[in-house]
Structures are given as C-alpha cells and as structure tokens.
Amino acid sequence: MLISARSGIVNTEGYEKLTNGAYTVYISGILFVRGLKAGEESIRWMLENYSNTGMIPFDKLCGAYSILIDDCERGLICFSDNSAMRGLIIGEYSIGSNFLELAKFEKHTEMNNNAICEYLTLTRCLLLDTFVKGISSTDYLSYYVLKDGKI
C-alpha cells in the first residue's frame, strides 16, 4: 500500500477492500473484536462505531493488521496494530507498507548513518529510524490522517 498526502491513494496492492456506506476500508492482516467473527464482521463493527462516535475504538481491536480508512470528510486515516507486528513506513508526505516503494516514490537516497550504526552494533534498529534519512517506521501507538496535502 502507498498513500500520499499530495496524490491520495497511490497503490493498495496486498490489501483487501471493504466498502461500508461512506467509508472504504483497506486492510492487510487479521482484525477481530472479542465476541465477533474475525474479518468483515469485526471491521463493520469498527466502522459503525467510528460512524456513530467519530472515534476508532482502538482498545477493542485485536489482531495483527494495518488499515486505511478512506473517509471523504475526515481524510485518509491509517494505523496498524499496537503490537507492532504490522507496521507502516512514513516519509515526508507519504505512508506505505513497502519501504523501497516509499523511498523510490519520495526520491529519498541519503543514508542514515545513525540507524546503520545502531543496526551494526545491536543487530537491529530499536528506534523508529530506517537506513534512509527522511523515512521512519510509524509509531504503533498513533494513527495518521492525510488531508489537504498534509499528514
């Protein structure tokens, strides 16, 4: 998936599409709400709750997923599960699920030496930084809204 604050939805490859009234949802992974069937039933419940309250019931959502909600009034809303099992990548003006696709789309080429040093020292990047400057992992405790050319 690749979405841009400037261009809207660029690519939804690898994501399932579900339309429910005024909203279109793109999901990758598995989402469930306790007491409901995983998948479509849980997604419809989440959207109904969102439609009624204007809030996403994050405390009720379980699973390993990344989601994009296309809300024509509020913008493009994306988030992933809080276990960081299905993370997203964020750039200057885009969010996506594929690091290389986002780096190419935003034309980032400068290496992030601090992240490379961290990886070579600890065999992993513990912070949100990636090997390329200007691109990082999304915070798994946050959601992102793309609207009017801004994230």
Image: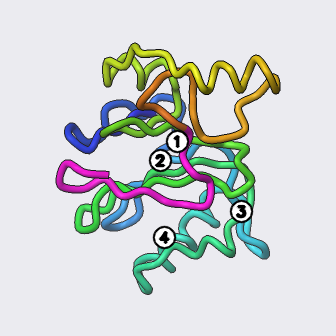
- Which of pointers 3 and 1 lies earlier in the amino acid sequence? 1
- Which of pointers 3 and 2 lies earlier in the amino acid sequence? 2
Residues packed near mark 2 inside 10 Å, few (<14), some (14 to 19) or many (20 plus): many
Residue hosting label 1: 16
Q: Residue at x 42, y 15 (%)?
A: 110
Q: 140 and 7: which one is in front?
A: 140
Residue hosting label 4: 47
The spot of residue 43 in percent (x, y) is 57, 63
Q: Are the two marked residues, 4 and 1, in contact with CB atoms closer than 8 angstroms?
A: no
Where disc 1 sits, the SS reads strand
Residues packed near mark 1 inside 10 Å, few (<14), some (14 to 19) or many (20 plus): few
- Which of pointers 2 and 4 lies earlier in the amino acid sequence? 2
Q: Which residues are magenta?
A: 137-151
Q: CA distance from mark 2 to mark 1?
A: 5 Å
Tell me, yes or no, whether the highlighted magenta stretch contains residue 145: yes
Q: Residue at x 52, y 33 (%)?
A: 97
Q: Residue at x 57, y 35 (%)?
A: 129
Q: Amino acid at mark 4?
A: Leu
Residue hosting label 2: 26
Q: 111 and 4: which one is in front?
A: 111
Q: Are the two marked residues, 2 and 1, in contact with CB atoms closer than 8 angstroms?
A: yes
The spot of residue 105 in percent (x, y) is 33, 21
Considering only vertical position in the picture, is 143 above or below 105? below
